[in-house]
Image: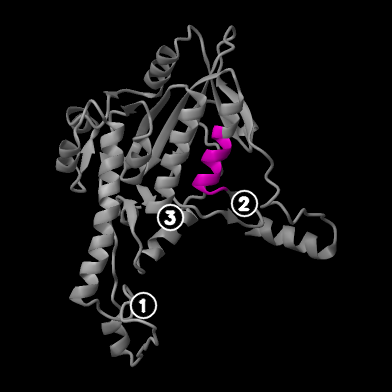
């Protein structure tokens, strides 16, 4: 606080010049070798997908972060344009997120694979649930960390009714609408049974898409009927997921690198990452972005649970943070 006061005093006195575009002027993504092999020309690109999946982009005076969609697309562009990139490892540590963001990320990864024709390996960290698992379904193989929690295949949409609270404090909300269902899911009133049926039909369609995506990704390992039997929202440990054939092996990042190297048929490879702050990358476990102690994106997602939104999300993860 004292340092901030000194900085503000200096600013007001005109002694310090500050670039007020700090948030927006974050530069382009740059490659950094984080696990070099002196003789290796071939590369494996390590790309992180972390946190609650959202299409929101945050810009402020002192910090800026791309949305998950922007970050993944930009990093895949670099990997695609580099002929020395022989494989990609997607490191996932996410409880999922909104339906559309999860689906866009999945589609972008599939499109990249179709163009680049290189192996793509998913490696799960602490949590790779719901939308995080949806994204991994686009990968060729999945390696789960021994302590990973994964699964939660399904859709969640929460409705919070504030009508009782508003009545107690003497507040009444009336909606003028063009049709009976125009304010369906409003937190200011209880839902009718007919409205619940309409919204359940929407959720069921998103659920069907999720099951289809997983069945396609696990083709040859699981049938659609087997996926449905696992897709009741439950989470799995790494060992349980391996036994259920939701992942292909249990291991660490080094195991995923070795798997990617083997699938790419390369003798020697070096591991690279892409970051707007490459000097901060000391090794493969360095963060490619600056993440606050409490992620603003997580808070925004928690707020949205008050309204009616559909998520491929392991929702208890948010409440436990």
Q: Main secondary structure of the magenta part?
A: helix
Instruction: Give the Cα distance between marks 2 and 3.
Output: 16 Å
Res 259 → quadrant: top left
Q: Nearer the viewer, residue 273 or 209?
A: 209
Mark 2 vs 3: CB contact within 8 A: no
Look at the numbered disc 1 and give the secondary structure of its residue: loop
Quarter-wise, where is residue 240 in the image? top left
Q: How many marks?
A: 3
Secondary structure found at label 2 = loop
Q: Which residue is mark 3?
A: 298
- Residue farthest to the bottom? 170
Q: Position of residue 238 (x, y in %)?
A: 24, 31
| Residue 245 in the image, given as x and y percentages of width and height | 21, 29
Q: Which residue is mark 1?
A: 182
At a point 40% along the width and 46% down the height, the residue shown is: 103
Counting residues from the start of the chain, the first of labels 1 and 2 encountered is 2
């Amino acid at each position: 606080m004292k340092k901030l006061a000194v900085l503000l005093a200096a600013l007001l006195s005109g002694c310090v010049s500050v670039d007020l575009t700090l948030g927006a002027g974050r530069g382009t993504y740059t490659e950094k070798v984080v696990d070099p092999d002196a003789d290796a020309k071939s590369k494996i690109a390590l790309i992180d997908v972390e946190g609650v999946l959202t299409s929101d982009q945050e810009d402020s005076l002192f910090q800026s972060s791309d949305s998950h969609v922007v970050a993944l697309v930009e990093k895949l562009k670099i990997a695609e344009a580099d002929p020395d990139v022989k494989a990609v490892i997607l490191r996932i540590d996410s409880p999922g997120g909104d339906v559309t963001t999860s689906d866009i990320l999945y589609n972008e990864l599939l499109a990249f694979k179709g163009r680049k024709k290189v192996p793509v390996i998913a490696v799960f960290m602490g949590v790779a649930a719901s939308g995080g698992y949806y994204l991994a379904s686009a990968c060729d193989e999945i390696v789960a960390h021994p302590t990973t929690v994964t699964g939660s295949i399904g859709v969640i949409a929460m409705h919070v009714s504030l009508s009782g609270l508003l009545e107690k404090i003497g507040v009444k909300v009336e909606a003028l609408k063009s049709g009976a269902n125009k304010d369906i899911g409003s937190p200011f009133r209880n839902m009718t049974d007919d409205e619940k049926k309409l919204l359940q039909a929407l959720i069921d369609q998103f659920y069907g898409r999720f099951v289809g995506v997983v069945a396609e990704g696990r083709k040859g390992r699981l049938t659609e009927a087997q996926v449905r039997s696992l897709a009741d929202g439950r989470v799995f440990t790494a060992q349980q997921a391996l036994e259920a054939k939701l992942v292909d092996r249990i291991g660490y990042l080094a195991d995923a690198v070795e798997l990617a190297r083997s699938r790419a048929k390369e003798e020697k490879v070096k591991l690279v990452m892409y970051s707007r702050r490459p000097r901060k990358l000391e090794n493969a476990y360095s963060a490619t972005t600056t993440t606050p102690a409490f992620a603003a994106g997580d808070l925004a997602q928690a707020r949205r649970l008050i309204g009616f939104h559909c998520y491929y999300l392991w929702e208890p993860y948010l409440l436990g943070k």
